[in-house]
Image (cartoon, helix red, strand yellow):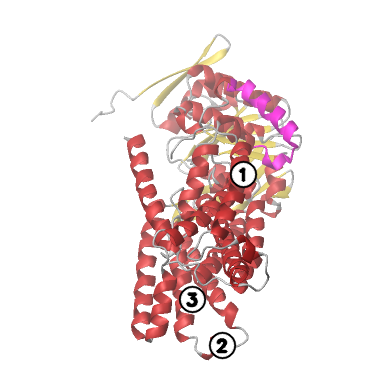
């Protein structure tokens, strides 16, 4: 077990944002969290990352409490990409990626080689010298993802990513998801929040459906991604069909729904 | 945010180091009294005394004060993740000044005691510390520091401090009124060896300790959550920064009065030339700050010679328009 959370509950101002959520991330697996807006996906990720303290429940990384670990030690084992990236200073792209290497404590030359590899894998070599603030939203997202992936070293066991490809074009979505898949295949436990059902079906082993702060269903991808489950999750009819060895999705509002 | 003109930081560093000796020599040479070489060779002569007892400590003071103001400015900009943060703008200097004036006006017998010389810097440090902590507390939200709130809090704290200083001036006698007024304008006029050495003793360690934080400050620019996820204990880093900035700014204010804009303009120029990496920004800002304040000090002696313009007025005359230019430039870029 790499990352384990049990009974995660978060209450704020008499509102329950998350209610008794259990998560188990296995080494070598890629788990996708799906859910409508405001379901508590980001809250769950913040708790798993140790950015917030749960009102109840616990998070353990390789059997140890997240809160008991030193900051650097945690950063070596757990890499996290949050949705908010408030960088507002004109760093170069390569400089931004290099910031991610900090916890690994590499020498200057090793650091450069390590970053170059990630720039290469995410097709950022051409942008390496550009000013981060001059990039488009999708490009910035790819740079931030490269930074988070550059944080991964030998000790890294888990990755948590909050909508890491939401602003990217189709090609780069696949490029980036493939990198995450490769990290999982290499033995890391990866958790990704996504909105895209097709990407989920292509790259996930496990799926967790979150609605109104509670787990609606979780388990293997094929077994969870069904018409009744997804329709109940999004309050809209989602037809799941088998096509060419994969899954195909089509969705529509119910016929009697009134659009205003 | 202004984007940069790529200049290797080493080249800028070299340029600044080359400029340093001539500016230092000019600072020793320029003044109401022209020095003669011959007289300088005779220890105890009038020229010798002017050089070693007045101009040399004053030079050390302007170098150290400029370096400390610039590096604390750069650090506080990283802490607030905003390039408009400045010890003067957000009220740290005013807080330090208020506490220092309170001690000057009400200190009475204490000032003449053995603790006298450190009493004013100590008060300024505490004043600066209280204001920094207060602004940070007011402007911090769960999503980061709000710039608007930070600047508004700065305006409020600046006017509260100004009002309180006004009240104290109203009640002070003629002599301390003149002293306080003159000192508040920012002045290196009364620098002696004691004050120069005190600033070096405090400013030196502050400078070195801030330089050590450069890498973590870079991570802080990614956002507080990102910095924590990269292994920075942000609460402790914040604590250390607030203490160091208050100590540095407090000491400069207590010895040289209110000297504005160095902390804002210098890091901006360096960032414009070499980018925002604090590993280069902090040392280069310290160097450029030392140069700029020494230049400003030379100007303050030249402009209305043989009298002297308070240095705070010189830095404001240069820094104010530059600040306006920056605001306009940002606005045009965003438009």
Looking at the image, the residue that sits furthest to the top is: A244
Foreground label between 2 and 3: 2
- Nearer-N-terminus badge (2/1): 1
Circle 1 chain: B
Instruction: Determine if marks 2 and 1 fall on one subunit.
Output: yes
Instruction: Please tell me the numbered disc located at residue B112.
Output: 2
Out of B49 and B166, give the one closest to the viewer.
B49
Numbered disc 3: secondary structure: helix
Numbered disc 2: secondary structure: helix
Circle 3 chain: B
Query: Measured from the top left, where is residue B122 in percent x and y?
Result: 57, 75
- Nearer-N-terminus badge (2/3): 3
Q: Residues within 10 Å of mark 2 (few under 14, many from 20)?
A: few
Numbered disc 1: secondary structure: helix
Question: Marks 2/1: CA distance?
Answer: 43 Å
Q: Which residues are magenta?
A: A100-125
């Amino acid at each position: 077990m790499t990352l384990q959370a049990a009974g995660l509950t978060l209450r704020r101002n008499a509102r329950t944002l998350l209610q008794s959520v259990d998560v188990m991330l296995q080494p070598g697996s890629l788990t996708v969290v799906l859910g409508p807006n405001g379901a508590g996906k980001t809250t769950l990720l913040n708790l798993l990352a140790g950015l917030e303290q749960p009102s109840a429940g616990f998070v353990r990384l390789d059997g140890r409490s997240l809160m008991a670990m030193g900051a650097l030690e945690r950063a070596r084992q757990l890499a996290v990409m949050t949705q908010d990236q408030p960088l507002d200073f004109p760093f170069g792209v390569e400089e931004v990626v290099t910031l991610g290497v900090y916890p690994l404590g590499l020498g200057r030359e090793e650091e450069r080689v390590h970053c170059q590899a990630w720039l290469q894998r995410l097709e950022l070599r051409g942008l390496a010298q550009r000013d981060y603030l001059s990039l488009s939203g999708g490009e910035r997202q790819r740079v931030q993802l490269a930074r988070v992936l550059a944080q991964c070293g030998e000790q890294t066991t888990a990755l948590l990513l909050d909508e890491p490809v939401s602003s990217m074009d189709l090609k780069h979505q696949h490029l980036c998801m493939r990198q995450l898949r490769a990290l999982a295949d290499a033995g890391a436990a990866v958790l990704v929040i996504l909105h895209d059902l097709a990407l989920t079906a292509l790259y996930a082993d496990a799926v967790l459906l979150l609605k109104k702060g509670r787990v609606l269903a979780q388990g293997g991808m094929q077994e969870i991604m069904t018409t009744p489950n997804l329709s109940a999750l999004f309050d809209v009819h989602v037809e799941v069909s088998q096509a060419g060895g994969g899954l195909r999705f089509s969705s529509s509002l119910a016929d009697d729904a009134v659009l205003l | 945010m202004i984007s940069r003109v790529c200049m290797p930081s080493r080249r800028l560093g070299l340029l600044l180091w080359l400029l340093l000796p001539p500016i230092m020599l000019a600072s020793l040479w320029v003044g109401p009294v022209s020095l003669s070489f011959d007289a300088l060779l005779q220890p105890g002569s009038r020229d010798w005394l002017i050089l070693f007892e007045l101009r040399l400590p004053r030079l050390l003071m302007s170098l150290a004060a400029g370096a400390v103001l610039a590096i604390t400015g750069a650090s506080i900009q990283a802490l607030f993740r905003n390039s408009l943060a400045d010890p003067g703008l957000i009220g740290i200097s005013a807080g330090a000044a208020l506490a220092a004036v309170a001690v000057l006006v009400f200190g009475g017998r204490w000032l003449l005691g053995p603790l006298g010389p450190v009493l004013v810097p100590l008060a300024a440090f505490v004043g600066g510390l209280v204001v920094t902590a207060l602004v940070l507390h007011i402007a911090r939200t769960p999503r980061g520091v709000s710039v608007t709130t930070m600047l508004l809090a700065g305006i409020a704290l600046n006017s509260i401090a100004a009002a309180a200083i006004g009240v104290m001036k109203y009640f002070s006698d003629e002599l301390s009124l003149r002293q306080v007024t003159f000192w508040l304008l920012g002045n290196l006029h009364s620098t002696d060896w004691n004050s120069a050495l005190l600033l070096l003793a405090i400013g030196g360690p502050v400078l070195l300790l801030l330089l050590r934080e450069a890498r973590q400050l870079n991570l802080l620019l990614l956002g507080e959550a990102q910095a924590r996820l990269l292994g920075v204990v942000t609460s402790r880093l914040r604590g250390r920064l607030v203490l160091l900035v208050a100590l540095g700014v407090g000491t400069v204010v207590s010895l040289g009065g209110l000297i504005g804009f160095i902390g804002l303009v210098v890091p901006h120029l360096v960032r414009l030339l070499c980018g925002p990496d604090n590993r280069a920004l902090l040392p280069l800002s310290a160097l450029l700050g030392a140069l700029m304040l020494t230049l400003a000090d030379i100007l303050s002696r030249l402009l209305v010679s043989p009298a002297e313009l308070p240095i705070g007025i010189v830095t404001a005359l240069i820094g104010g328009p530059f600040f306006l230019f920056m605001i306009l430039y940002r606005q045009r870029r965003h438009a």
